[in-house]
Image (spheres, grey):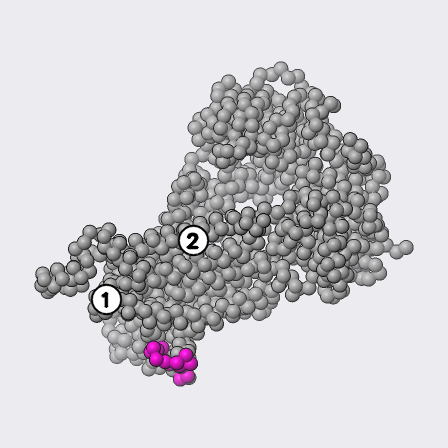
Amino acid sequence: MPPLLKIRNIVIEGQTGENWEPIVKGLDLTLHKGEILGLIGESGAGKSTLGLAAMCYTRPGCRIASGSIVFDGQELFGMPESQLRNLRGARIAYVAQSAAANFNPAHRLIRQYAEGPVQHGLMTTVEAEANAVAIYEQLLLPDPENIGYRFPHQVSGGQLQRAMVAMAMSCRPDIIIFDEPTTALDVTTQIEVLAAIREITARYDTAAIYITHDLAVVAQIADRIMVLRNGDLVEENDARKMLAHPQQSYTRDLLAVRSFAKKALDADSEVILDVADVTASYNGQDNVLEDISLQVRRGRTVALVGESGSGKSTLARVITGLLPPSSGSIVFQGEELPPAMKSRRREELRRLQMIYQMPDTALNPRQKIRMIIGRPLQFYFGLSAQEQEQRTLELLAQIELPEEYIDRYPTELSGGEKQRVCIARALAARPALIICDEVTSALDQLVAEGILRLLLDLQRKLDVSYLFITHDLATVKAIADEIVVMRDGRIVEQGPRNEILTPPHHDYTDLLLSSVPQMDPDWLDNLLAEREAA
Amino acid sequence: MQQWHFHPVVRLLAQRIGLGLLTLWVISLLIFVGIQLLPGDLADAVLGQSATPETVAAFRHELKLDLPPHIRYLHWLSGAVEGDFGRSLANQRPVAELIGWRFGNSLFLAGVTALIAVPLAVVLGLMAALYRNTLFDKLISTSTLSVISFPEFFVAYILIALFSVQLPFFPSIASITPDMGLGQKLYAVFLPCLTLALVVTAHMMRQTRAAIINILASAYIEMANLKGLKRMRIVVLHAFPNALSPVINVIALNLAYLVVGVVIVEVVFVYPGLGQLLVDSVAKRDIPVVQASGLIFATTYVLLNLLADILSILCNPRLRSPR
Amino acid sequence: MTSGLNLLLSAPLSARLGMLMVLLVLLAAIFAPVIAPYGETQIAGDVWLSGSAQHLLGTDNLGRDLFTRLLFGARNTIAIAFLITALSFLMGTLLGFLAATVSGWTDQLLSRIIDILMAFPTLIFALMILSVVGTSIPALVVVIALLDSTRVFRLSRAVAMDIEVMEFVEAARLRGEGLWWLMRHEILPNAMPPLVAEFGLRFCFVFLFIAALSFLGLGIQPPTADWGSMVRENAGAITFGIYTPLWPATAIAFLTVGVNLVVDWFLHLASGLED
């Protein structure tokens, strides 16, 4: 049987200024009926661009330069727009990363569901709406009879994502392209959406291209995997074979990314940060943090884990004094810190530094690295310009960046390099404690791993402590000495890493831990079976 | 169900209306206090050095200048609310009588202009946005950019030179009288209307274009494309409902601008409107007339801005049906 | 420096044309006393003469040389408009940045005051104030700069708010930096592109505004040469088929079109740099 979709030697270019530069460099892709193909790669791999090309669609500023896209015996490349329109949505559908942005805010969900089948002449409005309810039910959306009559902003993120999967299914297409559909979701929500996608594609024998940066996610879904890098193919194989026997070193690196773990250290160093019974709120009424107590020891890392809305970033704001708590105390190196940042002394501010999630916005784009790292040296230690330069060069060496970077602007650096500069800026103050707020979650996995290793290395050399805020349990394993699990503004469980990570767990910790996708292709099946049984 | 849906919008509207009323009150206060700050005594300023003490006293009594300021403010404000603005210093006629038909004339001019300019600007703006970066769009963008750079009187004189001097089709002086028929009136205001329409259309069109381009760049429009919908359907059903709120805002703001823009055009064409009266009265220092026409202009402007706010709140789907 | 030059060379035709237009007017303004064939208020011939070798563009309603008056008019009008724009930016950005960085009730208070001032139609407001304080040049400068600074305040506050939420500002705050550092070193450099573009637009607006006021007889007073009042003084000629008033009107349009062409390119450039 001929393949459903056959892309051959496709070149897609993107416009930078006046020039067209290749994003996808002559790739082949073959998809059979009912097959799920995983496209994996880091940012800039060209995976989304290639996925959209399956519909013969390019984003503004991109174009298909050459190649062939044969779908069900028809050549799509060069086909008039009006004929492509008959295929799009009807036979090839698309599911985007952000459902919130991709649903039209002005229309109810069910209307947007019915629009495709009605416009493509497949169903009447009444049929389509009845059909929508059936699909909503199959995707386990709550209250399937009525949920369609809500507006997009009235539905939660995970549910909206499933509603978009439903919408893609509305015309019973031959192929659905899933473009990072779970990346923006919490791990526990991700499971629901992954299960929904698997269930519905299997039920209707729909072929799919599943695009993601997360190899463990794609392992649960895909029959076959293509690993892409910078618009080129690295490796292509059956999913199980690839996970068991990766051929290329790049794939091996991607597979190994979650496997390193910090050596356990004894817990007997002195306590430098003691947060006691802290309660805080933004409006004076609803507490976003309640009775939080935790301790950080010298030269150790405490990981603060929780999903979005758990209050972990709020706790960072409280400790730094940006949000004064309504009660409780914060003792830092033996002295009680004033609750508000404004009443803290310069010396107190110096010893507590912060690194942020987005290195792009954490560095002033109009300041050179010289000034970004030099300013804390001048501000806290009053160093002269010459002393600043010397010390900045030492710091650059510590974060493994070349000396000539001192005269560069942040925009001339890659994401990982920028995050290193953020680390250097924090180190410039010679702090006792650094709060790391999701510092690796905006980075590609291999780059993130480099940052984690650097942080560990610096901790060993400088005896600095970290309060490490993250939603990613793999990161926790790699870096933490102690773990604090938070949910809805409260601490659920806390203790030394090995104690928390070995059963028996607290119920919520168990839910979090079990929801982290593993590289095992049977992981999702086993998990769902397990949860079914319980 | 409807009721709790309604709630936040009502609160938001009440807020806007409250702020609008507050603004109007502050404006009335500013206008009143401003005039009080006139250097020297108003009576001396108006009557001149040669006035006898009796005439000055009579004048002060006439204007109630002998009363304390806050009493005068209340008098003036309560009078203004009832439509009584006192008498003109220049010719002793009641201000309300002077202003009445002139304000009507100004509204006529602005109204006719709006009828031409609004549909034209919205359609052109929509087309420029849809056919972005085509020759049509570039042509329209460049010409509107030029028009908004021109002072209104430049456009007016060019039109006079073309259609009144070179080709004597239309009068260069737009004089209208109360007993003229609609057709005659329209003929008389042709050139001032055209001037205003050109300027306002240019502004409105550029803003409409920008608003629609902004919407067309959204992810849900790409999704509509990927669902294989027809271009027309995407524009009408997916872009338009979301563009409504910003476009209505643009229209109302430009109408407000139009109300003020009439001042210059009225002076160029010697049109008997409120704007010309204001300019004349400022030159003559006819204070009651300045106060009254200033207040009327400001009120119209504030109300139109308020209308823009209210309509754009009502058109916003997210605000209309909250969580 | 060379990159700035390259940028200029890479500018599209429309922007280069705009720069040329602005440059031409600026040169005329600077060298007015050198170029002008007659004195600013010198009566040099008959009334409303048409263009000739003696009078390049003819004469005005009092028989003064129109070309001379245009040159001096450029000087006066541009200088005053520039002064007003600079003043309004000084006040507007300072207060706007302050409102955004301090936030809280300072921001609330400032914003509400500005809201109310902005709800007032500028031209009407200016007319009324000028009817009270009289039409001297200092009064004109202060009144228009004050009114105009409300617009600058709104923009700079909005721009500063967008920058303020970025973590590098929070990082500077946490370091313990004062208000001045935050405004001067963290916010200002990032707010420059939109502010520079706005400066061009505001300059055009102020320039047109003064011209309009002068045209209404309430701006710069005779016998000082000024483009707006020159239109007014000669307005009567148009009905006789004499196009004298079109010259100063064209001059106004020429400069504003020039500035707008440059600003348009700059805005395009600034938005392109962001993504």
Q: Quadrant of residue A42?
A: top right
Question: Callout 2, which amino acid?
Answer: Ile
Residue B174 within the magenta-colored segment of the rendering: yes
Q: Local crowd at mark 2 within 10 Å, few (<14), some, or many (≥20)?
A: some
Quadrant containing the C terminus of chain A is top right
Which residue shows up at 68% across the image and 55% down it? A112
Span of residues in magenta:
B168-184
Question: Callout 1, which amino acid?
Answer: Ser
Which residue shows up at 33% across the image and 82% down it? C240
Whole-percent x and y of residue C274? 56, 50
Whole-percent x and y of residue A47? 73, 48
Closer to the chain start, of discs 2 and 1, is 2
User: Do the residues at pointers 2 and 1 share their chain?
Assistant: yes
Name the chain letter of the residue that bears numbered label 2: B
Name the chain letter of the residue that bears numbered label 1: B
Q: Residue under label 1, please give it.
A: B88
Which residue shows up at 48% across the image and 45% down it? C161
Q: Residue under label 2, please give it.
A: B17
Instruction: Report if residue A523 is visible in the image.
Output: no
Quadrant containing the N terminus of chain A is bottom right
User: Disc 2 or disc 1, which is closer to the eye?
Assistant: 2
* SS at badge 1: loop
Whole-percent x and y of residue B236? 62, 63
Q: Is residue A389 above or below residue A175?
A: above
The residue lying furthest to the right in this view is A1
Main structural element of the magenta stretch: helix, strand or loop?
loop
Q: Position of A183 compared to B30: left or right?
A: right
* Residue nearest the observer in this picture, C82 or A399: C82
Which residue shows up at 81% across the image and 37% down it? A525
